[in-house]
Image: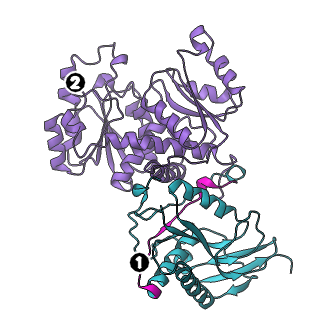
Amino acid sequence: MTRHLLSSADLSREQTEAILDTAASMHDVQRRQVKKLPTLRGRTVINFFFEDSTRTRSSFEIAGKWMSADTINLSAKGSSTSKGESLRDTVMTVNAMAVDALVIRHNASGACQQVAQWVDASVINAGDGTHEHPTQALLDAYTLRSRLGSLDGRHVVIVGDLTHSRVFRSNVITLKTLGARVTVVAPPTLMPSGVSAWSAADGFATSWDLDETLYAGDAPDAVMMLRVQRERMSGGFFPTAREYTVGYGMTRPRLERLLSANPEAAILHPGPMNRGLEISADAADSANSLVLDQVSAGVAVRMSVLYHLLAGDGSEAAA
Amino acid sequence: MPRPDSAATDGSDGSHSAPVRQPLPGQPLDPTGRDVLAASDIARALRRIAHEIVEHNKGAEDLVVLGIPSRGVELAHRLVDLIAEVEGATVPVGALDITFFRDDLRSQPTRAPMPSSIPAGGIDGKVVVLVDDVLYSGRTIRAALDALTDLGRPRAVRLAVLVDRGHRELPIRADHVGKNLPTAHTEKVQVRLTGSDGIPDVVRIAGGDR
């Protein structure tokens, strides 16, 4: 296994599947009364969140604690960062305390890559700017795999604010690693400029038209609705929220039409949801919605990532 | 003590047919080794152990048989089938993976855990029989005892092994032993089982100074 997890592209198909398989074992632990494994006893994991987060940070913290690692949370507010200390000085200070892993969320794309070059600890990317969020992609893949079995040849549609989405970038990589076909849908203003140049060879496609994508024969096995990131929405990317909903929201009529084409179609959303904007309450609360499964998988997948990065002696397992 | 009612992981309902499994990756049988137990010996040993378990427990009441992956699981299913023959009783059977409880995780590449499945009735107040193929240092059993502690509080824990090869590093002993095999540290004990390895049952000793 790699020492760091910076990008979903760091993981081969075998490694990705190993993490998902282990996550299944971890999920069993989660259902027990005694949710504790001694596996990472004596290891120290620091969650360094320079950007706000509820579910990622709490699930990393719970994951570390259930594995018996000592888990410490730091945030930009309340650390020396707020006194003007540079990122390098801050992480080197933490590194000097001989920690084993740094889980980092930062608003600058590439921050984790940069930190990984400085420190001795394993670095886990918990979301860097608009770049990547590999553990989210792993938990989405885990959720989908639990529902669909293998992802080979499955059709997954990702809809929403792609320009600002690190979830989408990591998801495309991980889903393609696992053999799924991915179609991404966004209004032209929220479609990143380079995406149309991505390889179409292994079933990757882009579209501006959600209805065409959903109903044009190739019915999706899963539709992932991304959050409209209001905090990054100062640029006038669409005229009104209502217009976005009409064009790109998982509305009730759209859900009904989707389910008439494929009654098994799964609905995902990485959260937090803007109900009534990108996803209707009907879709979010339907039997096809895997939103809560995603949250539940979050801890198991992060336990698995910590296990694979920290438990061994760092060498590759013999084939 | 809490009852881990939800601990069943694969809908294990005490059904007795051994699960269909891929042949295990492992070293090939050493052709220069010497076979110490043939298929018939193994069958006899397991039958005797099944009788011993039931005799000691005065019936099949409250028994739970847990195999330690990988080959302990197949042995556990075989023992439960044999107990069913002897007693006509259905004993819950499962698998207990101990990867997360090993004391040597840090000195090796990361190991992939094997699936665990604890019967739906849990282990509280039950007599748990742990089953493994080879008893050696005792460290696997130490880990298994830790794993059990997290699942509940059995009334008693017993240990059944196909082969006891000595060289214990911890104060642990087996209650039911298929065969005591005095071995040298340098020797390897290779166990192969039909269901796990796709070849006829055999126990072979390989390597060492000869």
Residue A140 in magenta stretch? no
Q: Is residue B103 above or below residue A65?
A: below
Find chain A in the image and tell me its colour. Answer: purple
Q: Residue furthest right?
A: B209
Tags 2 and 1 on a common chain: no
Which chain does the numbered disc 2 sit on? A
Q: Which residue is mark 2?
A: A244
| Near-viewer residue (A164 or A84) | A84
Find chain B in the image and tell me its colour. Answer: cyan
Marks 2/1 in contact by CB < 8 Å: the verdict is: no
Residue B92 in magenta stretch? yes
Q: Identify the residue shown where x is 42% and y is 60%.
A: B8
Q: Is residue B50 above or below residue A123?
A: below
Q: Which residue is mark 1?
A: B90
| One can see residue B171 in this view | yes
Q: Which residues are magenta?
A: B86-103
Residue B197's quadrant in the figure?
Answer: bottom right
| Near-viewer residue (A157 or B87) | B87
* Left or right of residue B163, residue B116 in this image: left
